[in-house]
Image: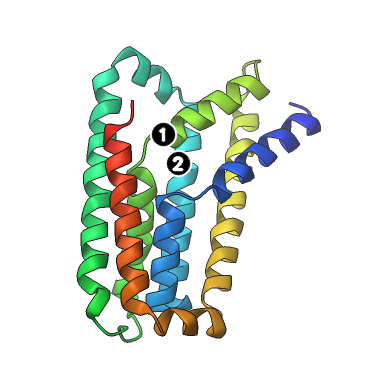
Amino acid sequence: MTAEQIALFAAAHWVAMVSPGPAVVATMQRAFAQGRRATLPYAFGLAFGASLWCVFALAGLTVLFHLVPPIFVALKLAGAVYLIWIAYQVWQGADQPVGASPDGATMRRGFFGGVALNLSNPKPALFFSAVLLSIFPDTLALPQQAALYGLTLANELCFYAALTLFLTRPRVRGLYLSAKRWIDQTTALALGALGISLGLSR
């Protein structure tokens, strides 16, 4: 494993992270509606959940998907239902005022909610598998796999933390509060569309 391979892997990973998807949309809505203190645990959960797909790819989960396609289909459908349910929740809350500061239990649920959201879409496993096979064609030793996972987790944490810190800036959040209903309903429609797209995709 060379420095050039690591840099190429990191670059491909960052391109994938910044591409709009359910996790980015959900982070935006939560950051706007609940503020920094509630969103950071959720963002860290998203980062950890996304990093697990790298572990699964390293462990050969995508091989199982190819050997038993119904498993992949079932995971996709479950993820689609979960995204549509979140979209419904956001739509329902569009007319409600911004909530009070969250307590510890709410923040813990936020972390695990972030993990669940990024585990609801199995497609990142295919991304990691394709990238790993193309960049690292030779078998990776366990310490090398651990290093790649560490890099993946660090990238995910940096991305979601930076996104949260930006979106919860007073001026940015103030713009949301001035158009909360419209933004929440647009977010709900986007999440619902992503859920339907996931369920119908091959």
Decide which of 29, 64 is in the foreground and name it: 29
The structure residue drawn at horizontal position 55% and vertical position 47%, both measured from the top left corner, is 17
**Mark identifier at residue 123:** 1
- Upstream in sequence: badge 1 or badge 2: 2
The structure residue drawn at horizontal position 35% and vertical position 62%, both measured from the top left corner, is 187
Of badges 1 and 2, the one in the foreground is 1
Determine the secondary structure under disc 1.
helix
Tell me where residue 176 sits by quadrant: bottom left
Q: Position of residue 113 (x, y in %)?
A: 32, 58
User: Is the residue 18 above or below the residue 90 in the image?
Assistant: above
Quarter in which the N terminus is drawn: top right
Q: Position of residue 50 (x, y in %)?
A: 46, 45
**Mark identifier at residue 102:** none
Q: Which residue is mark 2?
A: 52
| Callout count | 2
- Alpha-carbon neighbours of circle 1 within 10 Å: few (<14), some, or many (≥20)? some
Decide which of 41, 69 is in the foreground and name it: 69
